[in-house]
Image (cartoon, rainbow, N blue to C red):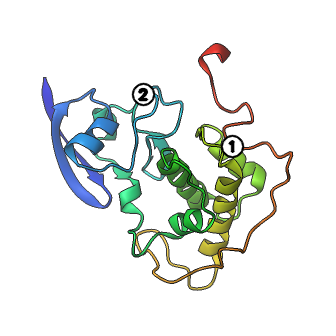
Amino acid sequence: MENTIALRVNGRAVSVTAMADTPLLYILRNDLALNGPKYGCGLGECGACTVILDGVAARSCVIPLAGAEGREVVTLEGLGSSSAPHPVQQAFIEEQAAQCGYCMNGMIMTAKALLDRNPDPTMDEVRRALSGNLCRCGTHVEILRAVMRAARLLSSPGAQHDDQPSDRHHARPDDRIAVPADADLCGADGGERRPADR
């Protein structure tokens, strides 16, 4: 039986009529036409579907619609735009962190949630936060650099964030941080769960 469920998505009140156990990801993509969250594994293990749910990074493929009732959901579309990206998005652009781009939604949303609660993370904290987000293209170093750059951008005087994306250039593209060659990288340090590991 279908139910009408109310929630907030990217600051907007919405009501959706669907089966209560429909994955939130399907509602976001199919009913609300928000294509930031991606379908990756359908098991909550790859991170491609990550959204921010009441301030916490969450896997929308395993959250039933009823579990989002009355809550605030933020998707990639709720951060910024191509003309005025959020500082986290800007940092990922400047670090050229995307190769195929499929994992970028999850990486950016997880990074945003991390930086909201910890504006000055260590590299280890960034790796831990991103350990459940998989990137098969191998851009882990660029992703780590992007999160560290985003932390700097967000802490710079006059930085705009949350629902106020900035349209100014924050940093030079060649302004890089060093990541040790032997560093454990997100998704490559054993933090990911593989079916054989269960």
**Badge 1: few (under 14), some or many (20 or more) residues near its Cα, within 10 Å?**
many
**Badge 2: few (under 14), some or many (20 or more) residues near its Cα, within 10 Å?**
some
Residue 168: percent from the left, percent from the top? 50, 84
Instruction: Give whichever of 80, 117 is nearer the camera.
Output: 80
Q: In which quadrant of the rendered image does the C terminus lie?
A: top right
Q: In which quadrant of the rendered image does the N terminus lie?
A: top left
Q: Earlier in the sequence, mark 1 or mark 2?
A: 2
User: Which element is circle 1 on?
Assistant: loop
| Residue on which disc 2 sits | 42
Residue 157 lies, with reference to residue 94, above or below; the image says below
Residue 13: percent from the left, percent from the top? 22, 56
Q: Which numbered marker is on residue 117?
A: none
Residue 192: percent from the left, percent from the top? 65, 31
User: Which element is circle 2 on?
Assistant: loop
**Left or right side of 46 for 176:** right
The amino acid type found where label 1 is placed reads Cys
Disc 1 and disc 2 in contact, CB within 8 angstroms? no
Residue 99 lies, with reference to residue 89, above or below; the image says above
Residue 133 lies, with reference to residue 85, above or below; the image says above
Q: How many marks?
A: 2
| Residue on which disc 1 sits | 186
**Left or right side of 192 for 16:** left
Residue at image coords 66%, 40%: 131
Residue at image coords 30%, 53%: 9
Residue 107 lies, with reference to residue 188, above or below; the image says below
The amino acid type found where label 2 is placed reads Gly
Instruction: Give whichever of 129, 136 is nearer the camera.
Output: 136
> Residue 66 appears in which quarter of the rendering?
top left
Estimate the spatial distance between the alpha carbons at disc 1 and disc 2, rounded to whole Å: 20 Å
Residue 173: percent from the left, percent from the top? 65, 74
Residue at image coords 35%, 52%: 72
**Left or right side of 152 for 4:** left
